Image (tube, rainbow, N blue to C red):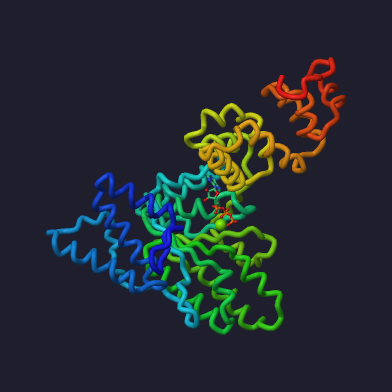
C-alpha cells in the first residue's frame, strides 16, 4: 500500500498507472483515473471529485474522448448502493485487463467457461432458437483455487465490470436492513451491464441456523431464490462458496451451472510454479519436479505465496535457493503420508544432489527405509552434506 494523504492505493494500482503513463497510453490512463473516481467516490469523495475534475478539464481541452467502452463512462449514471448505516459501498468493483488474470483451470472447467463465453458471443443465434444463454453459475471449492479470480477473468472476457457483493459484509449489517440492502444491491446490479458475483453465499445459510431472525432470513432466502430464477439473460449471476454443504438445496438447484474448482493436480502445480516463479523461473525450474511433488494438496494461492517469498528473499540476497527450498520441503512433510514420503525420498535422490542424510532429515524417514526404496547406494553415507 502507498499512503497518499488520506487515501491509499495498492502497489499494483500504482505500477499499472506508471506503466500506462510511461508507455504514453493516454486513453488508458484516463480510463484508469475514471476507475479510481468510481472506486473512491464513497470512501474519499473529495479525492474522487478532484480526480473527476482533472478528467473534465482535460476532456474540454480535447475535441473528443475516444473512450474505448462507453459503459465505462467516468460519470456513472447511477451511483453504487451503500449500506444505510455505514455508508460503505455494498460492492467491490473490478475492471480488469483480461491478460492480467488468465486463471489456470482444469480441462473440464476450461471447457465450461469457453462454452459460457461462446454463448454470450452468439446470444442472437440462441434467441432465434428460443434459447437463452447460461444466466447463473455457482462455483464450489476450497480457498485459494481461483473462484474469485475466474469471476474477474470472466467479466473481463465479456468486457463488463465485475461487481462483487460480499455476503458476509451484507449479512453483518443489522438484519432489518439486510433485506433492503440486498434488494437494492441486486436491483442495481441488474440494471448495470456487469457480471455479479455473490461471494461467500453460504453466509446466508449460516445465519439461518440462528433462531432469533428466522423470519427475516426466510424472506432473504426467498429474495435470493427469486432473483436467481429471474436473473436477466443480459447479465450473469455468479455465486461462490467454500461450504456447499451449508447451502439450501433449493437455492443450489436454481443455478444453471454448478462448477467445482479443485486443488491443482500435478500438471497445474507445475504450470503455476513456472508462472509464479516469474523472472526466477530458470533458477527455480531446477527444483520443478521436487516442488511439484511437495505442493500436493496445496492451493494455487499457497503456491503463489511461497514462490513470492522465495523471490523476495533471493532479490534481497538472502539465503541461497537450495536452502530456502530445503527448509520449505521440511514444512510440507506433515502433509504427506508415509508412502508419499518414501516416494518423495526416491525423487529427491534422483533429481537432486542431496545426501542420504539430508534426505532422511527432510523426509523424517530412517536412512534404512530410504535405502530399501532402492533409490540410494547401500554404502554408508559419511559426507554429511551435499554429494
Ligand atoms: N486457478 C488459478 N490460476 C492462477 N492463479 C490462481 C488460481 N487460483 C488462485 N490463484 C492465485 O491465488 C489468488 C487467490 O485466489 P482466489 O481469490 O481466486 O481464490 P478463491 O478460490 O476465490 O478463494 P476463497 O474461497 O478464499 O475466496 C489469486 O489472486 C491468484 O493470484
Ligand atoms: Mg474468493
Does 273 appear above or below 70? above
* Residue drawn at (26%, 54%) of the image: 68
At x 59%, y 79%, the residue is 219
User: Residue 173, percent across and down?
Assistant: 56, 78
Quadrant of the snapshot with the C terminus: top right
Res 233 visible: no
Please name whichever residue, 309 or 200, is drawn nearer the observer in this view of the structure. 309
Which residue lies at the image location 61% right of the left edge and 55% below the top edge? Answer: 140
- Residue 232 lies left or right of residue 312; in this view the side is left
Camera-side residue: 305 or 341?
Answer: 305
In the rendered structure, the answer to whether residue 190 lies left or right of residue 285 reads: left
Residue 190, x across and y down, in percent: 42, 68
Give the image quarter of residue 204: bottom right
**Residue at image coords 52%, 28%:** 282
Q: Residue furthest front?
A: 317
Q: Nearer the viewer, residue 69 or 89?
A: 89
Q: Is residue 154 visible?
A: yes
User: Which of 60/202 is in front?
Assistant: 60
Q: Answer with the quarter of the image where residue 345 lies.
A: top right
Query: Residue 29 occupies which quadrant of the picture?
Result: bottom left
Establish if 290 lies above or below 328: above
Residue 383 at x, y percent in the picture: 77, 20
Q: Position of residue 191 (x, y in %)?
A: 38, 69
Amino acid at each position: 500500500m502507498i499512503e497518499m494523504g488520506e487515501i491509499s492505493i495498492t502497489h499494483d494500482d500504482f505500477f499499472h498507472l506508471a506503466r500506462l503513463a510511461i508507455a504514453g497510453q493516454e486513453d488508458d490512463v484516463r480510463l484508469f483515473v475514471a476507475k479510481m473516481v468510481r472506486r473512491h467516490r464513497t470512501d474519499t469523495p473529495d479525492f474522487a471529485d478532484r480526480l473527476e475534475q482533472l478528467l473534465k478539464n482535460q476532456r474540454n481541452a480535447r475535441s473528443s474522448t475516444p473512450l474505448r467502452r462507453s459503459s465505462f463512462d467516468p460519470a456513472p449514471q447511477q451511483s453504487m448502493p451503500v449500506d444505510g448505516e455505514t455508508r460503505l459501498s455494498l460492492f467491490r468493483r473490478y475492471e480488469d485487463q483480461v491478460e492480467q488474470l488468465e486463471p489456470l483451470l482444469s480441462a473440464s472447467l476450461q471447457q465450461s467457461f469457453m462454452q459460457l463465453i461462446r454463448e454470450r458471443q452468439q446470444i442472437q443465434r440462441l434467441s432465434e432458437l428460443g434459447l437463452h444463454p447460461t444466466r447463473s453459475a455457482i462455483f464450489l471449492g476450497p480457498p485459494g483455487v481461483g473462484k474469485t479470480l475466474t469471476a474477474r477473468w470472466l467479466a473481463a472476457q465479456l468486457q463488463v465490470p465485475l461487481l462483487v457483493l460480499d455476503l458476509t459484509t451484507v449479512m453483518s449489517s443489522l438484519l432489518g436492513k439486510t433485506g433492503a440492502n440486498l434488494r437494492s444491491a441486486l436491483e442495481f446490479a441488474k440494471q448495470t451491464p456487469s457480471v455479479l458475483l455473490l461471494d461467500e453465499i453460504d453466509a446466508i445459510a449460516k445465519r439461518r441456523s440462528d433462531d432469533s431472525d428466522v423470519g427475516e432470513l426466510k424472506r432473504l432466502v426467498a429474495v435470493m431464490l427469486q432473483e436467481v430464477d429471474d436473473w436477466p439473460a443480459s447479465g450473469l449471476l455468479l455465486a461462490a462458496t467454500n461450504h456447499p454443504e451449508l447451502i439450501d438445496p433449493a437455492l443450489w438447484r436454481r443455478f444453471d451451472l454448478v462448477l467445482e474448482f479443485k486443488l491443482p493436480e500435478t500438471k497445474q502445480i507445475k504450470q503455476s510454479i513456472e508462472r509464479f516463479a516469474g523472472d526466477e523461473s530458470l533458477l527455480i525450474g531446477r527444483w520443478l519436479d521436487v516442488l511439484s511433488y511437495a505442493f500436493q494438496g496445496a492451493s494455487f494461492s499457497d503456491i503463489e505465496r511461497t514462490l513470492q517469498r522465495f523471490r523476495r528473499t533471493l532479490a534481497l540476497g538472502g539465503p541461497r535457493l537450495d536452502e530456502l527450498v530445503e527448509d520449505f520441503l521440511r514444512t510440507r512433510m506433515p502433509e504427506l503420508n508415509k508412502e508419499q514420503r518414501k516416494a518423495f525420498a526416491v525423487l529427491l535422490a534422483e533429481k537432486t544432489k542431496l545426501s542420504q542424510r539430508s534426505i532422511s532429515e527432510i523426509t523424517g524417514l530412517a536412512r534404512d527405509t530410504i535405502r530399501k526404496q532402492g533409490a540410494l547406494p547401500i554404502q554408508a553415507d559419511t559426507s554429511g552434506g551435499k554429494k
